[in-house]
Amino acid sequence: MVENSATAAVKTKEMIKTPSGFNIIWRELMRDKLALISLICLIGIAAFVYGVSLVLDQEEIVRVDLFAIYQSPGEDFILGTDYGGRDVFGQLIIGTKNSLSIAIIVTLMTGFIGVVFGLVAGYFGGHIDNMLMRILDFFNILPFTMIVIAFVAIVPTYSVLTFSIIMAAFLWMGIARLIRSKALQEKELDYIQAARTLGTSNFKIIFKHLLPNCSSLIIVTMTLNLAANIGLESGLSFLGFGFPEDTPSLGTLLSYARNPQTLEYRWWIWVPASVLILILMLCINNVGQALKRATDARQRRG
Amino acid sequence: MGFLKVEDLKVHFPIKGGFFGRTLGYVKAVDGVSFNLEKGKTYGLVGESGSGKSTTGRAIIGLNHITDGKIEFEDKEITKIHRAKAEIRKDIQMIFQDPYSSLNPKKRVLDIVAEPLRNFERLSRKEERFKVQELLELVGLSPESILKYPHEFSGGQRQRIGIARAVALKPKLIIADEPVSALDVSVQAQVLNFMKEIQRELDLTYLFISHDLGVIRHMCDHIGIMYKGRFVEEGTANEIFNEPQHIYTKRLIAAIPDIDPNKREELKRFRAEVSTEYEQAYNDYFDEEGLAYGLKPISETHLVALPEKG
Amino acid sequence: MWKFSLRRILIMIPQLFALSLLIFILAKMMPGDALSGKIDPNIDPARIEELREEMGWNDPWHEQYARWVGGVVKGDFGQSFRFKMPVTEIIGQRIVNSFWLSLVTLILTYLIAIPLGITSGRFNDTLRDHLITGYSYIGFATPLFIFALVMLWVFGFQLQWFPTSGSVAPGLEPGTFDYVASKLYHLLLPAFSMALIQTYSTIQYLRNEIVDTKQRDFIITARAKGASETRVYNNHILRNSLLPIAAFFGYEITLLIGGSIFVENIFGYPGMGQLLVESITLRDYSVVTATTLLFGVASVLGALLSDIILSIIDPRIRIK
């Protein structure tokens, strides 16, 4: 009996150390009903939006039609039209596509900057870490919305790319901090020391040893960041500092509600977009939280 | 002509603090250690935890910053070599204490064992695979296991993988940092005997670091006893175990357990004796800070840390 | 503690320097300068050049920077070329409005979050806890501007319980009771919108802290001695958990600043956030620079304040 429980203990210990952690994460996700529904929802929305926007004629949708302004939902337009007579439903599809795309681009950019920054600071430690952390602290205290708005206002050639670069430039700190502390822990482990004695270069150690061992943390953080970025992007577009009007995002539709008339009487313009943003953010957050539980052995549900 | 010569090695870690993170003082992990290592022999570094034995090993291979002193390997000074690709890395390798953390959990055995080969030798995929299989066979693992991950092996098997990795480049010196202390006692002997085997086969020299005198006795030709960053006694295995001179060494040896139950009473009395002697003579063997004195030769190979007067 | 505070303040100096430099560069990059808006296009270009020289626009950048910083320190942010008056004057009233909005929001946040956090922690894994956690999680996942829009729609337009724009009803004499009451009335809806959304971190922190402390030995000892449950909570658990909450308010300032820009624009509340957006749309760059700088300085000071208070409460962080 004692023998058995001892081997069982060893086994569980080994299970936790299992590197094929992706299987575990996947299993956990499948077990978490809410997260599973959210994931299906997300995939559905994304597939629908990207699929339909292939068929939709974007030029047609953003073209102003003065004979059809502010039409309420009906036969001609499922979700009515805005002040330019543009089809809200079509804008919703394109807006969701644009919002999702830019959120993904920004998440990847911040992920890249943050991971490299965090790994370098954590692996080298000492003076390098000190210096990098000072820089991070500085970026951290900047009021994000203000700085981004100011930058967006002055950039001469304003496009989706410059917008995402500006956003990413002030959003990489969170993930950098997390990766740094993970790297600080991880580099004390013998396999990193071993790699050094085997003549592996620092560059290789960082990207071939440290990076794979931070992968689950990176995936979880980036998922949660994706949700946050959708909110940030639509917020900036709402204020009028996001996408230009000919590339509508979900925030652009909401920005029409800054006109009190629209807010009060023409709900069809801004309510669907709000609901969609909420659904997207909740779903992505649910998936992210489930991933977080799955990668944290203490929180695992069993 | 020496194989490995360590001269007055010092590794001090600064204690940061105060207003601007100034250095307030130093932890003297290794404080003036000298010894020589002959080719093909095994040198044992013994001491309690925190005595600086592991730091010494890590400093030699370049994992710790060396504050002062000199290390010569085959008459070449290697104290200041930090480059990853330095040839010296091929000749000195290390076996780590914890077989669980010393293998990257995200890598297959093939990648783990091939890592040093990829750093120093240009092999084709096929050659590399063949070489790794050869190495696995050498350490007694099935060559089919190259695609498995570390967690699929037991502690003893993992340590063998670590050894395969360490010998992949045909090194001359292997620093073994407590290679068996994380293993079950039943597996310890297996791994130790196996290490002796490959020592003969590959003509290796070991610097064997351990806190376990039983293991050291089994493995080593020469022994250095460390205490608080300094040597208290150095000599051949015979001299250390049969004629210990320093009071600290005596105490360590008295603490070795004996499996013969008939000797239990005798051993107990002996330990009590040594313990009283240790307390009474403490001031004769250690200075005011509780550190060992410099080493004085009492025979050709036997050195003991004794105060000037005695 | 003094040592830590002093060191923390010393760290702040390069931060402020970098902040001012960043904003100065922003200002320099902005298209056009104060003159291009001010001057009649019929004026001789040579005269413009003369004026530029006079204003120091042709000096090396570090001299311009030094002059600008010198002005800022004395409270001189230059001239707004849209409103033709000193920026400081424009900002004056707005800053007061923003300050009150932030203060009321902060108070409301704590009034909502602390009781909920305590309930959630004390009765963890009950229905009550799940409801509270669910609410704060939805708050966390909802963008502030959407929530604020909905609040304005429901309580401002549909139910008409609250005013839908402005900071005070027109025609009231400053200093009278009615004036103050009207100000507060205008504040409530925007402040509630922000507060309800921002409770997540406080509730979660309190909950985790209480769940943790609950199982500590000294709490079990207190219970074993026969202290009543209320006494255990008031004297032992809360004392440990509430102080850090109070200290976090400095960090909350950054959040409040970020939120104010949305809330002020949605509720038409004349504060700094609204000013920033307005002046960018009007290309009134000297105002943009000034507001951005002030927001930045407020964040820096907030972080400083929290760090110092935390170091007093929790000696462990002083080591770092």
Image: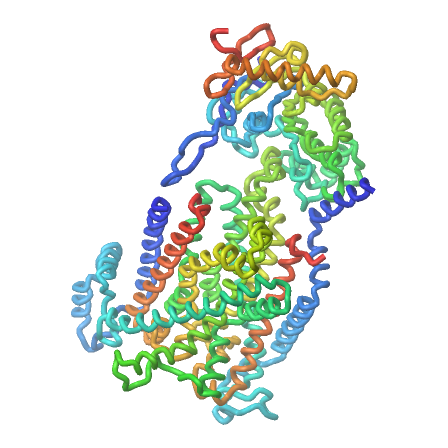
Give percent across and percent down for residue C114.
Answer: 49, 65
Residue B8 horizontal/vertical position (percent): 50, 19
| Residue B37 visible here | no
Whether residue C76 is situated above or below residue A137 in the rendered picture: below
Give the residue at x 41% y 63%: C254
The quarter of the picture where residue C187 lies is bottom left
How many numbered markers are drawn?
Answer: 0
Quarter of the figure with residue C168: bottom left
**Drawn side of residue B261 relative to residue A187, left or right:** right
Q: Is residue A161 above or below residue B169?
A: below
Q: Can you see residue B119?
A: yes
**C237 or A248, nearer to the observer:** C237
Dividing the picture into quadrants, the one containing residue A108 is bottom right
Left or right side of C303 for B242: right
Q: Is B37 above or below relative to A176?
A: above
Which residue, as the protein is rendered here, is positioned at the far right? A1
Q: Nearer the viewer, residue C213 or A203?
A: C213
Residue B81, placed above or below residue A185: above
On the rendered image, what quadrant is the C terminus of chain C found in? top left
Q: How is the image coloured?
A: rainbow
Residue B167 picture location, percent across and down: 69, 29
> Is residue C298 left or right of B306 when viewed as pictured?
left
Location of residue A258 in the rendering, given as x and y in whole percent from the top left corner: 44, 81
Q: Between A154 and C90, which is closer to the camera in this rendering?
A: C90
**Which residue is drawn at the image coordinates 43% and 63% (left, top)?**
C252
C167 or B219, which is in the foreground?
C167
